Amino acid sequence: MIKNIVALFFIAIASVAYSQQYPIQLSTQLAPPFTGYLEDYGDDALQKMRLLVLQTDLTEPSYDVKLKIKIEGSGIKIQSKGFYYAGSFNLQPGMPVMLSGSDLAGLLNINNLDFTGISKSDYQKKKVLPEGFYEICITAYDNNNPAQIQVSNASCAQGWMVHSDPPYLNLPQCNSKLKTQNPQNILFQWTAMNLSSPNSAAVTDYEFSLYEIRPAGQNPNNIVQTIPPIYQTTVTVPLINYGITEPPLIKGKEYAWRVRAMDQSGRDYFKNKGYSAVCTFTYGSIYDDLLPLILHA
């Protein structure tokens, strides 16, 4: 296993090995899909970022190194504060060391970072970087020297950090007309759009809201912004059975509904603040009760 890691490492740095004279070589690796939440990259469970470190100077018995980070993209630069280093880490010649999770967590702690293009307080409000292409670079320095002596290449990895799409509404279909049922029983169902994301559906709540469109003919997008819902609840699964314990729907009335995806940790992981598009449907007809009388006339 160690031999394979060493072989892969030397392949990765072969293109720069002759131009760089540093005694330490780094290789930064990011695991897709990418998240804009910085602390994810220092999470032991997620393993979103790993740093392979190798001492290539065989004339030295060992090196103690410390690390700094720089993140750039979308007009934003975030880098380690001047006084802050992660480490130290002891290296032996020819012996690769893999750092990840808690080893690198200090580099991603916002208290150890300077922000340009976005303020620390703005980042804390949403807890996620704006969408865009970012480059993350890590550099090693000599831990035993009070001066900032660089001893490695600046190893960079790139990723497109995106927010998850909000839920997609399936049933009832938009602009549909539902048959009335007795007792009342309507299935509302939607698709979670973050199933392949680190913003996992397993930690997502769904806020379901149902509105009566009144007066008739009003724009449903205005309705959801201006009047309270007739029914609202939060669930952890992408469906609701709207039955006899929920407010009764009125025959012939038009209704609007939407769903908001919310990360349970409070992170702003979703586009449009997690809100789906607004769908409408008409619940039966005011003539439903008259039809049996007409047929039997």
Image (spheres, rainbow, N blue to C red):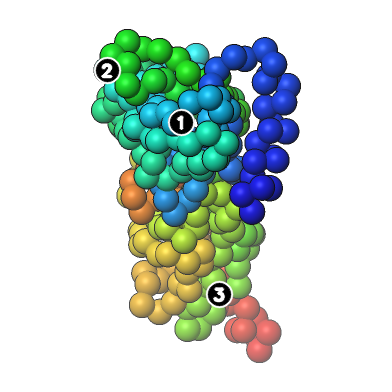
Residue drawn 60% across the image and 84% down it? 293
Q: Are marks 2 and 3 in contact (CB under 8 Å)?
A: no
Q: Secondary structure at mark 1?
A: loop
| Residue contact at pointers 3 and 1, CB within 8 angstroms | no
Above or below residue 70? Residue 195 is: below
Residue at 32%, 16% (x, y): give it.
Answer: 145
Mark 2 or mark 3, earlier in chain? 2
Q: Nearer the viewer, mark 2 or mark 1?
A: 1
**CA neighbours of label 3 inside 10 A, class few (<14), some (14 to 19), many (20+):** some
Q: Which residue has dot 2 on it? A: 83
Determine the residue positioned at 68% across, 48% down: 4
Quick check: 153 above or below 178? Answer: above
Task: Choose between 212 and 7: the one closer to the eye.
Answer: 7
- In screen coordinates, is 290 left or right of 227? right
Mark 2 vs mark 3: in front: 2
Q: Which residue is mark 3?
A: 180
Crowding at dot 1, Cα within 10 Å, few <14 / some 14-19 / many 20+, comes out as: few
In percent of width and height, residue 241 lies at: 48, 73
The answer to which of 2 and 240 lies nearer the viewer is: 2
